Image (tube, rainbow, N blue to C red):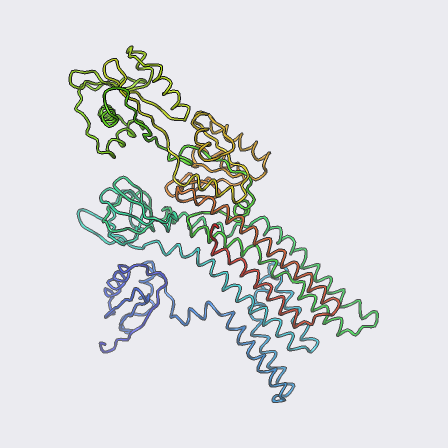
Amino acid sequence: MKTGFTTKKLHLENMDCSDCAMVIQHRLERLDGVGEVSTDYFAQTVNVEYDPRRIRMRTIKSRIHQLGYSLVPDKSASFYKENWELILSLLGGLILLITWLSVQQGWVSQQASILLYLIALFLTGFDVLRETIDSLQRRHIDIDLLMILASLGAIFLGKYVEGVLLLFLFGLGHALQERALNKARKAINSMGEFMPKYAYVRRKENEVLLPVDQITFDDLVLVRPGDRIPVDGEVVVGFSSVDQSPVTGESLPITKIPGEPVYAGSVNGDGVLEVKVTRLARDSTLARVMKMVEQAQSSQAPTHLAVEKFTKILVPFVLSVVLLLTIIPPLFGEPFSESFIRAITVLVAASPCALALGTPSAILSGIARAARDGVLIKGGVHLENLGQIRAIAFDKTGTLTLGKPLVTEVIPLGDLDSNQVLGVAAALEELSGHPLAQAVKYEAESKKIKKPEITMIMARPGRGVQAMLGEQHVWLGNIEMTKDDGSEVSGKTLKLIQDLEDQGKTTVLIGKDKDVIGLIALADKIRPGAGQAIRALQQLGVQHTIILSGDNHHAAKHIADQLDIDIVRAKLMPEDKLQEIEELINKYQMVGMVGDGVNDAPALARASVGIAAGSAGNSVALETSDVALMASDLSKLPFAVGLGRATRSIILQNLFFSVAVMILLSAFAIVSLSGIGLVVLIHESSTLVVVLNALRLLAYRVS
């Protein structure tokens, strides 16, 4: 170490890549007065050698904050900060135990024991008292006040052990509850770990390392193998598999080629990608999802609101009952001390701690679990409603199906085989951008079929396309084209076309001169996993499934039959879908609607729960829906519905358990069957039970 220099170890909370460590090191070493800097990415630490005569530690920390990183003084300070309430409770409990044992052995005088008990009372009740004062300043009477009054009442009667024990167990229980709930909060906050802080950007043929928030639209970002993708964008150069599970919840990597979208927070595979920025860092899909999840945490569920209203009435009622139990029995000759301790015991027994925590802890855990699997639930009300859905309506195109036509059959009708027919069709469609043409060309390319050389290509609007194949006239089109040209179509071929169209397929004819030489059928294929998702929903108790489609009835009915969907409504405009949802709600009460969030927006908004599928790249879907499935994988739908049902079940379990404990303890306390110590122990244990029960949702899996 240089003369006059000192070394300081700093702990960082969000150094999320090895490049970040290098950036911090280089930036700090440029400061005047700073010597050697070493960073440890895995330990999340920075060792800084500096001359305190030339630079203050405050300046070094300020520079680190400017780079976008958070600092804690050291690990121990962070531990004390996070566990302050628990440490105070345990310290107070230890003093209580030592004092009680000393009194039993006669080691301390009565005056000394009282002083020690009061010290323990102060330590165990410090945070409870502070929160009570804050509540009273807001003119709000809450459970903390009941605990303070009960403890002071016991102290007033000379029951120091019971009074301190009450606040010790209450404070300890509260601290343990916070630690448990922090597990759910961290499951949500951990999403932020997927956001890189820096990225390599190509600027004037140079690679420049820039903070992500300085990257602008159309910048070219370089993503190396194994890196997290720092921005939402579109691949312009490269080929790689990308793990999108942090954003969409998809379990398998997705192949990315030029033209494919990528999302910030995804992990690149083995290839090198150049990505054109399409969204600023603050507007990336992951950033918006994190913001919406944070908002969802503060959104209260109907059950939570009902419980809050109930507790606002219950707390004054309990205080009134306690007052009556204190005053009335002495009027009939009972000693005041006995009536007062009974009243204090009832005060503890009737405090609705477990009741107040049962619902919000379950909602928090449910939303955290959903977010971890690529399902964005925008509030407790929607999570509860998911648990009550009796019917689900689906848009067809793009939701149950892939949303683009694919070739299903190539049927030769002349002297050419199916591959030759497909080759002629692909050659005729070479210059067309129509979705059907794209499907024909894709099928030919996937089968590596050689296309014949054709000339004099000419489009026939509304009919098809024609060209010359050597000396022969070849064409591709619909049935109307054959009528115009006088081509011969046999009755057998017409029957085949009708059968295919009855299956919801579109047909195109391929001909040579006046003869039909082949037929190609195309259809929008069912999305992989859609059938399993529908069956899983039925097993979860969704009694009715419905298709609401703008397509023709034959196409919609064909999809419904394959997926075992009950009801089909076809040829619907967006306003018609809205009307259908209204009727379904009148019939089934709780109805979900699954769509793409664009033309289905009115129906999504009106449904009991609007669910948008494949929302990662769809801004409208993210904004208009109540629940967003970030991937196009419909298996997330039964997961979301099952999670809603599990959450509702746990809420009901918690409510029943907490009310039962409260009633039984109050009854036992009123007839003096339970002392205050036992009541305190059972009361605080019940609060921990409901929180731990709620945390089971973090491990939820569809059975």
In this view, which residue lies farthest toward the top?
Answer: 486
Whether 231 is drawn above or below 50: the answer is above
User: Can you say which quadrant of the picture contains the N terminus?
Assistant: bottom left
Whether 309 is drawn above or below 454: the answer is below
Left or right: where does residue 598 sit relative to residue 208? right
Q: Position of residue 5 (x, y in %)?
A: 26, 75
Q: Position of residue 231 (x, y in %)?
A: 31, 48
Left or right: where does residue 603 sit relative to residue 129? left
Q: Residue at x 42, y 36 (%)?
A: 399
Q: Residue at x 29, y 66 (%)?
A: 40
Left or right: where does residue 255 sit relative to residue 530? left
Q: Position of residue 82 (x, y in %)?
A: 46, 67
Left or right: where does residue 545 sit relative to residue 406? right
Q: Position of residue 194 (x, y in %)?
A: 35, 54
Query: To which quarter of the image does residue 117 belong?
Result: bottom right
Q: Residue at x 35, y 14 (%)?
A: 491
In this view, which residue lies farthest toward the right?
Answer: 332
Q: Nearer the viewer, residue 347 or 101?
A: 101
Q: Nearer the viewer, residue 46 or 561?
A: 561
Q: Nearer the viewer, residue 253 or 598?
A: 253
Whether 649 is drawn above or below 177: the answer is above
Q: Nearer the viewer, residue 261 or 499?
A: 499
Q: How many marks?
A: 0
In this view, which residue lies farthest toward the bottom?
Answer: 107
